[in-house]
């Protein structure tokens, strides 16, 4: 009764795109705020933690861009 449709591996659905867009936006805003706050912090321990956070947010952004660039993964190159 419930017939599943075959979806090509390299397809991004509208729901997927909405999710990726939200994730990109959240990480982008967090990256901007963290970078802006870095200039106001004097404590080096906090600066280091914020630096690690900016790396995390930037990695997340790059991962999302990689997914959008190659939706099916490495096997579809």
Image (cartoon, rainbow, N blue to C red):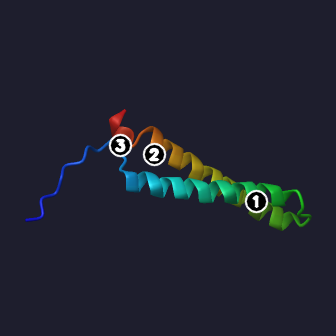
Point out which mark residue 72 bears: 3
Element on which disc 1 rests:
helix
Instruction: Report the residue at 49% width, 54% height from top.
Output: 20
Q: Which residue is mark 2?
A: 67
Position of residue 46 measured from the top left corner of the image (x, y, whole percent): 81, 67
Which residue of the protein is positioned furthest toward the left in this rendering? 1
Q: Which label's residue is closer to the chain start, 3 or 1?
A: 1
Point out which mark residue 49 bears: none
Position of residue 30 measured from the top left corner of the image (x, y, whole percent): 68, 60
Instruction: Report the residue at 26% width, 43% height from top.
Output: 8
- Determine the CA span between mark 3 and mark 1: 32 Å
Q: Which residue is mark 1?
A: 34
Q: Cβ–Cβ below 8 Å for labels 2 and 1?
A: no
Q: Tag 2: Cα neighbours inside 10 Å, few (<14), some, or many (≥20)? A: some
Q: Which label's residue is closer to the chain start, 2 or 1?
A: 1
Q: Viewed as shown, does residue 42 lie left or right of 30?
A: right
For this rendering, which residue is in front, 77 or 68?
A: 68
Element on which disc 2 rests:
helix
- Would you identify the image quadrant in which residue 74 lies? top left
Element on which disc 3 rests:
loop
- Determine the CA span between mark 3 and mark 2: 8 Å
For this rendering, which residue is in front, 51 or 71?
A: 71
Q: Which label's residue is closer to the chain start, 3 or 2?
A: 2
Q: Viewed as shown, does residue 77 lie left or right of 4?
A: right
């Amino acid at each position: 009764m419930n017939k599943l449709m075959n979806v090509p591996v390299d397809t991004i659905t509208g729901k997927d795109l909405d999710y990726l867009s939200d994730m990109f936006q959240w990480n982008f805003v967090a990256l901007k705020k963290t970078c802006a706050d870095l200039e106001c912090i004097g404590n080096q321990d906090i600066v280091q933690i914020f630096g690690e956070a900016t790396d995390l947010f930037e990695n997340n952004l790059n991962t999302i861009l990689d997914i959008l660039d190659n939706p099916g993964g490495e096997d579809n190159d």
